[in-house]
Image: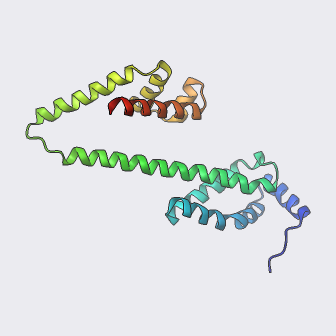
Amino acid sequence: MMRKNNPSDDAELFSRFQRGDPAAFRTFYERHHQKMRLNIYAFVGRMDIAKDIVAETFAKLFLNRTKVKDASHISGYLFVIAKRLAIGYLRLQKRQRETDDAQKQLVERSYTNPAEAEAEMEQVINKILGLVRQLPPAMKRIFRMYFFEGMDIRTIAKQLHLTETAVRNQKNLALGRLRKMLT
């Protein structure tokens, strides 16, 4: 039979956890990891990925342990971090599928004349570049830094003194506009 946690014991355990005590961290890990792993598995559909996300979530918890207010906030903190990581994984998978589909279409298309293929590719690139020029200045700058210069969101945010969320939103808005203009 499972015994209830004593609030004073939890307060002492949490205090040890915040000071970096591995045994205290292990206790919180044992309390939460199985439920988290099953929830994330239901979300992403792959146990190996769910285990990786849970491991990364607990690593973030340990690194940010002094930011957690008390033991009752640990569960919520873990849930938010794990959910963000799972959504990031799913977005990455979606982008990879879209890229794979686009590459597959290009490979399956047959050209009898290589010059014809090159001319068509040049037309598409020129059309995209023309559409990018029509974007608002800030959006255009972020789009170019991300897609043409290969910079990541964090680097762009630091260079432009913006939040990562603002950069991500501008990039996504630019992509949305370009998609609409291309169709």
Taking depth in this image into account, of 113 and 54 the one nearest to the observer is 113
Q: What residue sits 59% from the left and 27% below the top?
A: 162
Q: Is residue 22 above or below residue 61?
A: below
Of residues 92 and 152, which is closer to you in this image?
Answer: 92
Note whether 38 is above or below 148 in the view shown.
Answer: below
Give coordinates of residue 180: x percent, y percent.
38, 32
Residue 56 pos. (x, y %): 60, 54
Q: In the visual, does 41 lie left or right of 23?
A: left
Q: For residue 23, which quarter of the picture?
A: bottom right
* Residue 51 visible within the image: no
Q: Residue at x 26, y 30 (%)?
A: 124
Which residue does the image show at 69% across and 49% down from the upper left? 63
* Quadrant location, the N terminus: bottom right
Seen at 76% across and 45% down, the residue is 67
Q: Is residue 1 left or right of residue 101?
A: right
Q: Is residue 129 above or below residue 107?
A: above
- The image position of residue 14, as x and y in percent, is 82, 57
The outermost residue toward the left is: 112
Q: Position of residue 161 (x, y in %)?
A: 60, 25
Q: Residue farthest to the right?
A: 8
106 vs 148, left or right, is left
Q: Does the rendering let one see residue 43?
A: yes
Number of numbered markers: 0
Question: How did the renderer colour the structure?
Answer: rainbow
What is the quadrant of residue 135 in the picture? top left
Closer to us: 26 or 173: 173
Image quadrant occupied by the C terminus: top left
**Vertical comparison of 32 with 130: above or below:** below
